[in-house]
Image (spheres, rainbow, N blue to C red):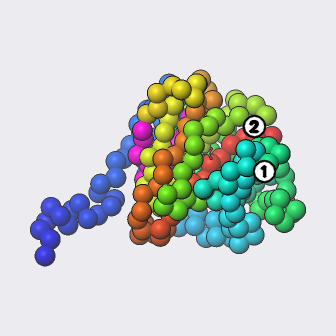
Amino acid sequence: MPGPTEDLFADDALQQPSGREQIGDESYVLRGYALPWIDRLLPELRRVLAQSPFRRMVTPGGFTMSAALSSCGALGWTTDTSGYRYSPLDPRSQQPWPRMPQALRQLAAEAAADAGFADFAPDACLINRYVPGAKMSLHQDKNERHFGAPVVSVSLGLPAIFLFGGHERSDKTQKVSLFHGDVVVWGGVDRLRFHGVMPIKEGVHGVMGPQRINLTFRTAG
Ligand SMILES: O=C(O)CCC(=O)C(=O)O
């Protein structure tokens, strides 16, 4: 029978940090920010994914990404051997991407405002699914038309180590642990900083199962 201390540490929520952590001049981790939204968010996410299911895309260099992707909103980020771009159509169905649910849009706008970016109006929500072992290499988000709006990134499910670098690929990276419900916002002078995700460790999350889902909101058009 575990003692009281073990019981305490068996509870995920009690181990999770809370509050706002600054990771750059204009970059913040909002710990647990999305938790109160989860019950509204998950059914909407299921509807989006029924219409535009996850698929693994190929990079211009011919590599299949380990994360599987989908999107909602007016524009969806896609990649194939001819390049990275935003498209109004899901390349799989040639139909518009599912509309961005109001709960997702509102969560992103409120998180951006709390991090100092008022009036965030995302038109693209990229949905990344990582199974254990999947990762995202260091990259800059620069397929958007302008860089005035921040990036808002919501983590769900298995924990991840987010790599937050500088403006050069070779710059030192900070390792930021992200948990279910955490939101990262970066913009302004930090908008083009390199970032990525280390391979996800094996595990099963109590709500999301054996996966991590990340929602990344941007103003792309
Ligand atoms: O999964 C994440 O936390 C980051 C995703 C990301 O870097 C991206 O979609 O550009």
The residue at the far bottom in this view is 1
Q: Position of residue 117 (x, y in %)?
A: 60, 34
Q: Are marks 2 and 1 in contact (CB under 8 Å)?
A: no
Q: Residue at x 58, y 67 (%)?
A: 42
Marks counted in the figure total 2
Disc 1 residue lies near ligand 1 with CB under 8 A:
no
Residue 75 visible in this rendered orientation of the protein: no
Q: Secondary structure at mark 2?
A: loop
Please identify the quadrant where the C terminus is shown: top right
Q: What stretch of residues is rendered in magenta?
A: 175-186
Q: Nearer the viewer, residue 77 or 116?
A: 77
Q: Which residue is mark 2?
A: 144
Which secondary structure type mostly characterizes the magenta part of the structure?
Answer: strand
Gap in angstroms between the C-alphas marked 2 and 1 = 17 Å
Labels 2, 1: front one: 1
Q: Nearer the viewer, residue 93 or 171?
A: 171
Please identify the quadrant where the N terminus is shown: bottom left
The tag on residue 80 is 1
The residue at the far right in this view is 94
Q: Secondary structure at mark 1?
A: strand
Q: Answer left or right for 72 relative to 131.
A: right
Q: Position of residue 59 (x, y in %)?
A: 72, 48
The quadrant holding residue 50 is: bottom right
Q: Is residue 34 above or below residue 211?
A: above
Sequence-first tag of 2 and 1 = 1
